[in-house]
Amino acid sequence: MKKLGIIRCQQTEDMCPGTRDFTTAKEGSGSLAESGIGQCEVVGFVSCGGCPGKKAVTRAAMLKERGAEVIMLASCIGKGTPIGFPCPNKGLMVKAIKAKLGEDFPVLEYSHEASAKKC
């Protein structure tokens, strides 16, 4: 079982406790299933640090240092859950995280399918 670090949107953390992100990790569903990674143990759950998400890079490196073998951006960043507004800086965050951690380090761009009702 791989170790997973999750980065969430700071703007939506008061609307979403991350329940589906943790369920996704436990079940190995969503992007973890699509990527073939499967079930994971969560070793950290942090925010991007706020717009424009620059702290996501150093926080991803911190998660890796603490054992994460995969970084997953929560669906609040990748799909806009729960408010339907994906992060306009997601692409830059992914690119910068990969540059910092290495192009081969797995960085998933969302956790679960978007839902306006539950996150």
Image (cartoon, grey):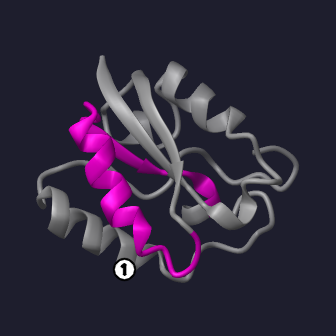
Is 109 above or below relative to 23? below
Residue 113 appears at what percent x and percent y?
A: 63, 49
Residue 42 appears at what percent x and percent y?
A: 45, 27
What residue do we see at 56% from left, 31% from top?
A: 24
Residue ID for mark 1:
92
Quadrant where the N terminus is found in the figure: top left
The answer to whether residue 53 is magenta is: yes
What residue do we see at 25% from left, 42% from top?
A: 64
The answer to whether residue 4 is magenta is: no
What residue do we see at 64% from left, 62% from top?
A: 10
Residue 103 appears at what percent x and percent y?
A: 12, 61
Q: Secondary structure at mark 1?
A: helix
Q: Is residue 58 left or right of residue 83?
A: left
Looking at this view, is 100 or 2 the one in front? 100
Quadrant where the C terminus is found in the figure: top right
Q: Is residue 91 left or right of residue 86?
A: left
Is 57 above or below relative to 113? below
- How crowded pointer 1 is (Cα within 10 Å; few <14, some 14-19, many 20+) is rated as few
Residue situated furthest top in the rendering: 1
Q: Which residues are magenta?
A: 50-76
Q: In which quarter of the view is residue 35 placed?
A: top left
Q: Amino acid at mark 1?
A: Leu
How many discs appear?
Answer: 1
What residue do we see at 53% from left, 20% from top?
A: 27
